[in-house]
Every structure is written in C-alpha cells, then in structure tokens.
Amino acid sequence: MMDTNIDLTLSALKHIHNMTESVYTSKQLIDKTIKNLHLQDSKLNAYITILDEYAFERSIAMDEKINRGEELPLAGVPIAVKDMLAFKGYPTTAGSRTLENFIPTFNSTVVEKLINAGAVIIGKTSCDEFAMGSSNEHAFTGPVHNPWNLDCVPGGSSGGSAATVAARGVPLSVGTDTGGSIRQPASFNGIYGLKPTYGRVSRYGVVAFASSLEQVGPMAYNIHDLALLLSVIAGHDPKDSTTLNEVVPDYHTSLDQGIKGMKIAVPDNIYDGANKIMQSKINAALEIFKNNGAEITEGISIPSWESALPAYYLIAPSEASANLSRYDGFRYGQSSVEYSDLWQRLENTRGLGFGKEVKRRILLGTYALSAGYYDQYYKKALKLRTMIKNDFKKIFNDYDFIMTPTTPAPAFKIGERITNPLEMYMSDYYTLPINIAGNPAISIPCGFIDDLPVGLQIIGKDLEEQKLLQCAAVYEKETTWNQEIPSF
Amino acid sequence: MALSKQDIEYVAKLARIKLTSKESEELTEQLSVCLDYFEMINAIDTSNIEPTSQANNLVNVTREDVVNENMSVDDVLKNAPEHFEGFIRIPKVID
C-alpha cells in the first residue's frame, strides 16, 4: 500500500493490527506522521523537539521486530512524550531556558518502558516551564495553540501532549499531572487523559516539580489506547521509592465489564462559578451512566474541597522551591557569565534562566517555608491535606466514583489570564483536590461549549484505574465526542 | 497588601534569584493577591488534625547497598558549563 493511504486518525491499536498484518510498515507510518507533524506544528507549536532521524531509524528497527513476529505491545507506534521526561541523548528542557541545552545521560523509567514496548518516540512536547502552569503559555519556545481554536490555549501544563493528540498528530502521548496538568488539557482538547494513583507510575527521570503530588500518565483519543498505554507505563520501580509494589492489571483487555450496580457520587455546589452550560453537559453524561445500570447520588457534601486550592498553592510551590534549588548552573543548565563571586553567579543564573511563573512559585514557596510563616502556611496546608484525604476516603467507603466537570469552562484565549495568576489557578479548581488526596482520575470528552471541547472528570478509589477505564469505555460506546476531529 | 516589596526582595535573596525592580513590583502585587485569597484557610479549625506530607503510606523504603550501573563521567561533564580534569569547576566558595 502507498504510504499516502495511511489513515493517521486511526487508533494505536488499529495501527498495530495493520502493521502486524503487513498492510503498511512502521517506517511508512512514521514517515507520514513526521511530515504531518511538521505541517501541523507550524500552527500548533506543540513540540520542543521533533526527533525525525531517531524516529526513522527506530521505525526500521521496529519493522524488523514485527517481521520476526516479536510481540511488543506498542511495536512501531508513534508516541509523543512531554519534555519533562529524560530521554538519554536527546534534549530534555522541561520547557525552561535553564535546560535549553541539557542532554540527559540516562532514561526516565517511563521512557525506558516505552522503548522496551516497541514504541517510536517521535518528539518531546511543549509544556509550561517545569510543568508550572495551566495554559502552556510559559514554555521558553512560546505558547502552544489549541487545535480547536488557534487563539485559545491548549491548557497546561501538558498542553503540547494534548494538542498533538487532539490534532491526530499521534495517537498516544505521555503527560505529567501535578494539579490537573493531564486532565485539564485533555478536557480543553477533547481527548482522554488519566492521572494514575500516586505511586502507580514511576517518576524516576522526570524533572521534579512537586514530588508529593505529581504522577506521569497517558493521553489518547481512544479509551482502549489509553488503557494500553497505562498498562505499559505503570508498575513498581526500585528507582522510585514512592512507587507502589502492586500488580499491574492488563487494563486494555478487560474494559467491557460495564458499570452495572456501581455507585456514583456527584458533589453539591460544583457548578458555582462554572460556565452555565456545563451542568447540562454533565447531566447528559450522568444519564448515560444511569441507563447503563449505575446508581447516581447528587448533592454529596465535600466540605474540604474549597480549601484544596489554597492548600495546593502552598504545598506545590513549597516543594518546588526545594526541588528547583538544584538549578545552580554549575553541574548542568544555563549559567550566567557575569558575576564577581559564587553567590552572584547563582543569583544571576537563576534570575535569567527561570521564567515569570517559576519565579512566582519559588518565591511563594520560599515565603511559605520561611521562619515565622511555616506554621501559618505550609504546616496548615498539610493539615488541610489530611482533611481532604479523609473526606475522599469517607465518600469512597460508600461510592465507586465521584464525578465533576474537569474544568469550570472551556479553553480561554491566549494572553487572557497570564497577568492574573489567581484567576489562572482557578481553572484547576476541580482537579487540584485529587492530587492532594492521591486518587486516580480521568478526564473524558463529554461535548462542546461554543465549539470548544469540555470534559467530565471521573475520580476513583486508590489503584482502581481499571474501574475508571471501564466507566469511560461505557461512555465511549454510546457517544461520539472522542471521534470529533479539529480542522485548523 | 499582604506583602511589601521588601518582603519579596528578602524572599528572592533566600531563594537566590535576582529580580529586576519591575519584577519585584509585579510579584509583590501578584503574590499579595494570592496570599489575601489564602486567608480563608485561617477560618478552618485544624487544631486536632495531624499534617499529611505524602499521599500514600509508604515509609522508609530502603534497598540493599550494592553498586549498580553508573553514568559515565565524560557524559555527565558534557552538561557542565565548566569542568577541569574530571571535576566540575565553580567559583571560589571560601575566602
């Protein structure tokens, strides 16, 4: 078959099937994917690095494996990886000028797993600098554009990973989620994004931002693809002592078990401050779950939810201020050449290398941890975290899922919130509490408001990603939102 | 406002980040807005609540003290702005 006939809107599983059946080769698929990515990226700016040469060579090697009959779960499939994950020998910038020329000397565990699974890493996607942001306007390579409306943000911080999947540039991508950074952009782009349980996926080799909150997770436009990718990247890792030593199910092979008899909790007051049409979108989705045998209880009270935003914006910046102290410009990274002594070089290096949002968060965190404010801010936030965790635990004693919108409204315009941090932080209102509690959650496309996609967030019990995926699969069967493709 | 420009400059000093005067002014205003909003947490009674610093309950995960594969020194030094005879070079620390 001529490679021009390859349909780039197919799912990863369909591509795998077609390559196994020799309908086309990985080389042909990758060739067409890369040409398409370059065209798309002149409008989206979703990539910091596109790995043309690496991907070509890799696809040839994968074709050999496929021809030999080797069974690899992602053999020959193109995948994009957020530029927060170290990839040995290739630039890994975290969206920061500080790391513009940094070449990792080792692979992150997730990258290693993708390589072992036969995936072809086709590029490193843009993200807000050090994953701090909700709009992907804070990368040193400039803002990423939303394929549904190029004037809008794709969300963040995994905006590049979301935009390129929505545009059908690649069927799969990897993001990181510290306060909603997978789910919020997934929602803004009309795709699936899952934040696994804290400890489900290794963070070894992931540029650290807020270590008690962040997880690596999959993004895709097909629920079976999403499940397959989670199966590949999840699992215990001796190199990350926070990973859980629990068996990883084959998520993608048991998606059709339905949700009969499962219990869904819908919190009260969740539409306060949300777009007026959001409620009808969520209600329509709930109706589908009800028709499939789930029991829905509305008006569930989660009193601590309101405190999650301040708690998050004290805990995450505090951890960031400690994690980012490593950027001294001595061992790696950009370094100032103008200085009279060591301290001045440090201050100049960090002053030049970090962007606005990163400075904001480091200073906020340093303040919250500084003498005299530690108890008032940081310790208080950790106590609020206990209350949030307890509230979630209580609800999950009686229910299988909590459902909310993923975001209060669809994507906003580029530049609209960049000078108002608090307003920007509010777009993560629904997603932040989940990172604080550690539970898994998925965003699934559930319709459009003003021609922009919006998402439904499904939150589950610890380590019950399987149920989240089953629930999403039920919804995918009865709707076509995930099949909508942006033209741009 | 919750913060003064002097507060921001002091915290920037602690964090070892050089700010321009314009940046200090912007950050003073923006972080004051955030801290004002965070005031709401003072109204929440947490007197009988223990702090939680991590989301799962793992404690003291250890491993055997064995030598594993290491990174090559040459590769690591490629990322260092200045190095000399296998060492990273930095300005003098103690006078």
Image (spheres, coloured by chain):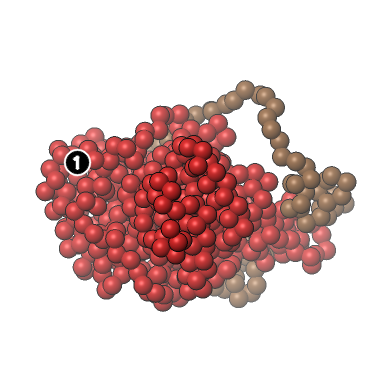
Residue A5 shown left or right of residue B61 in the figure:
left
Label 1: which secondary element: loop
What amino acid is labelled 1 in the image? Answer: Ile
Image height of B43 relative to A155, above or below: above
Identify the residue under disc 1. Answer: A259
Image height of B70 relative to B88, above or below: above
Report the front residue among A238 and A422: A238
Residue A48: where, in percent of width, then height? 57, 63
Residue drawn at x 48%, y 52% as measured from the top left: A25
Residue A413: where, in percent of width, then height? 39, 75
Q: Is residue A66 visible?
A: yes
Residue drawn at x 36%, y 44% as measured from the top left: A227
**Neighbour class for label 1 at 10 Å: few (<14), some, many (≥20)?**
many
Q: Quarter-wise, where is residue B14 in the image?
A: bottom right
Chain ID of residue with mark 1: A
Residue A243 shown left or right of residue B90 in the figure:
left
Residue A165: where, in percent of width, then height? 41, 59
Residue A334: where, in percent of width, then height? 71, 60
Residue drawn at x 39%, y 74% as measured from the top left: A488
